[in-house]
Image (cartoon, rainbow, N blue to C red):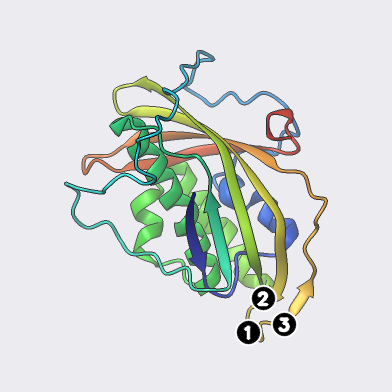
Amino acid sequence: MTRRRTRTALIAASAATALLLTACGGSDSGGGSDDIPGVDETTDEPAAPEDDVDEEPVDEGREGRPEIDLGSDYENIYEDEFTGDPVVDEILLDNQGFQDAVAEAIVSYDNERPSLRYYIADQALYNTLDLLDNVYQTGHTSAGSARYFNRSVTLREEGIATISFCRDFSRIYTTDFETGETVEEAEADSAPSRYVARMQQNDEGVWQTVEYELFREDAECQ
């Protein structure tokens, strides 16, 4: 299990449902189709993890990966994400970077953090910035922890992949950004949501998220 911690928050519990993937403008389909333009329906599951696979791959050969400061009051927990396949694991690592980059921008109320544009591009970036503006206007953020599980990568063609995963936000509670006071308690009975994202490798080798969708209370996440 890999853990990343954030500082004072992530976002109000209601907004947190959509935070880490609806930012790109994907629809809240409520269990509808997960089609993404340019992606077919064929899926090839990655190889099952082996017992001797390290928990997290060593990030060698890439210069300039930005540090992400997620502080101590919020935690992203990623479960069972690494497979031993170097390409798949790099995609999973960069998708994890995407989640943390958006969280960092929210907990810091700063949309100029270098990680944001390192891991996000194209329509996903435009809509993420719109979402961040809306978050900043509320004056609210969150604390607690979010859990990511059932992560699955499909390689489509050279430099293009899709990823599907579930997000459990039932331990996130809303706080006031300035005072840190609790505004709304966590919704312990909130069902996990499923996310589907399209990722594209740029010239520097980074698998950037370029678009994605949210499906609330999806059966695959129960």
Residues tagged 2 and 1 counted as in contact (Cβ below 8 A): yes
Q: Left or right: where does residue 186 sit relative to residue 104?
A: right
- Residue 220 vs 214, above or below: the answer is above
**Residue at the spot of label 1:** 178
The residue beneath circle 2 is: 139
Q: Position of residue 86 (x, y in %)?
A: 29, 33
Badge nearest the viewer, 2 or 3: 3
Q: CA distance from mark 3 to mark 1?
A: 8 Å
The residue furthest bottom is 179
Q: Residue at x 33, y 64 (%)?
A: 67
Mark 2 or mark 3, earlier in chain: 2
Q: Which residue is mark 3?
A: 181
Q: Earlier in the sequence, mark 2 or mark 1?
A: 2
* Label 3 CA crowd tier, 10 Å (few <14, some 14–19, many 20+): few
Q: Quadrant of residue 222?
A: top right
Relative to 77, 62 lies left or right: left
Q: Secondary structure at mark 1?
A: loop
Label 2 sits on a secondary structure element that is loop
Q: Position of residue 160 (x, y in %)?
A: 36, 27
Q: Is residue 174 visible?
A: yes
Callout in the foreground (2, 1): 1
* Residue appearing at x 50%, y 39% in the figure: 80
* Amino acid found under the numbered disc labelled 2: Gly
Would residue 34 appear left or right of 92 to someone viewing this image? Answer: right
